[in-house]
Amino acid sequence: MKDNVTHKNKKCEVWAVGSGKGGTGKSFITSSIGIHLASKGKKIVLVDADFGAANLHTFVGVGKPQNSLTDFFEKKTPLKDLVVNCGVSDLGLVAGSMRSFEAENIKSQQKVKFFKHINQIETDIILIDLGAGSHFNTMDTFLLADKMIVVVAPELTAIENLYQFIKSAFFRKLRLVLDAHGLKTTFQETWKDREARGIKSLKDLIEYLICVSPQVRDIISREMSDFNLHIVVNQMRNGQDVFIGSSVKSICMKFLGFNARYSGSVEYDESVTRCINRKQPFMVTYPSSPVARAIGKLSENLLEGKEIIIGKNGSAY
Amino acid sequence: MEAHTEEYNKYFKVLELSPKAAISEIRSSYQRLKTLYSGDSIAITAVSDDFSEEQRQNILSQIEEAYTKLSDLFKNSERIVDGKPKNYKSVILDDSLRKYVADIASFTGSELRKIREKLGIELHDIAGFTRIRRQYFEDIELERFSGFSSEVYLKGYILAYAHYLSLDPAKVANDYIARYKAWKDSDNGSNNGKLQSAFRNQEDNNR
């Protein structure tokens, strides 16, 4: 798979942050993790890959940079030359391309190049802010990452879209992996005749494919155990909301069959919106607020592969 | 816990725990998952379109099975504490530890601590299960007798502690209370200690 090729000799880790639904605070979480880790001595580069609605720069308190990903895709400017400094030391930013509405139609060759270039940026961690939703460009970038992070808010629609996002990501991965093993037709034909075969869901598809041959079974079981999700609950409004993360994690594992970690939970705070409106980075403005402490804990959990533990009374630590 | 087979690891996985989890964690994880899969949390509702009743029941029975098997791993017995029956789940002592315990002439705080550490049990496990403050168990092990307002309370705590470790509660309590009495009759059990315990009781009332 291309992942293995591009990841060879790589120096940095790539973390991608996605969410099924807009408005869950994904860009806020991404930028805040970046600011926190930069303050702890890590070199961070944020990449705004939300091709439709790029405004990650606002979250780190800088104006719209002159150059953006559009220059990479249209003028072939090397990605590393597009990194601009933010107000925070050790934090770089590759701005998104608001103008380029066609960006959603990036050709697959360009994407492969984008993945290669990302790994050439000299830094410790690259944090990619993805567009909300399950577009296949978003999926491919998500699947490229060393850490796949999903942000969800404690509301029904956000959770529904999150499951959809996760399923789409694995569907895409399944297709790419089987392609890479020369099993493209197996996948395509199964999917084409899905109705006749009684395949109604991703789970049905997986169960069907597993029975096709031992080779396919081994590929799928390996890919499923490699598929690690890191769940973040944002905008918690009450003490019970912290349990949403463990519930979602449980369903990802028991129902969808993937590995999942509950990496952190962040409460709702209206001063976050106030900071965004004033173009102030929240983490710099309110470094000792409960939200900033939760972001700190979340960042360290992600770094160390740990997860939060919930006490009997619902307190997360 | 010794000798975890693949099978037990599977049960721990069903309850989403590490194989080192204590009985208190097993219990709370079981309760949480059971509530989740039998209830209508938005995390479940969001997936209900492709979640059949049959699958839900299947998951619930897996959770149930895992809990039953793991509880069997820890011994299940009915005990009487302070005249009230309590369902205590305690740990199993292996042969070498049983021999070690049998050789103890008199249970002291430090002996109890040694046994607990050999079993790999944390104080908060006992506290979580018995719903008695962890501080009291620490005081028991360190023989900080001034932390107890009366013998009756101490006896309750020491019985709960001994049950949890699968020790003979009557023997442990007898030995230990004798040490408490000896301390009380000496100079140590004077005003200072009483003040401390009165203060702690006040805290308890405020909780």
Image (cartoon, coloured by chain):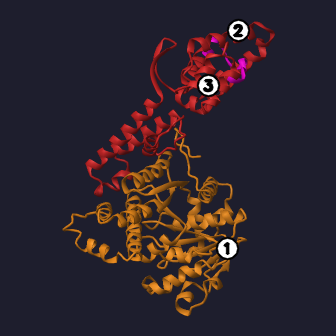
Residue A98 x, y percent position in the rendering: 51, 82
Expressed as whole percent of the image width and height from the top left, the position of residue B18 reads 52, 44
Marked residue chain, label 2: B
> On the rendered structure, is A95 left or right of B68?
right
- The residue beneath circle 3 is B204
Q: What percent of the width, then of the height, locates residue A138?
A: 45, 74
Residue B145 or B116: which is nearer the viewer? B116
The answer to whether residue A295 is magenta is no
- Give the farthest residue toward the top: B185
Q: Secondary structure at mark 1?
A: loop
Could you tell me the amino acid type at mark 2?
Lys
In the rendered image of the structure, the colour used to display chain B is red
Q: Chain of mark 1?
A: A
Q: Position of residue B149 (x, y in %)?
A: 67, 15
Which residue does the image show at 67% across and 59% down from the upper left? Answer: A286
Disc 1 marks which residue? A123
Give the quadrant of residue B70.
Answer: top left
Secondary structure mostly seen in magenta is helix
- The picture's colour for chain A is orange
Single out the residue that lies furthest toward the bottom.
A75
Crowd around label 1: few <14 · some 14–19 · many ≥20 (10 Å): some
* Magenta segment boundaries in residue numbering: B141-154
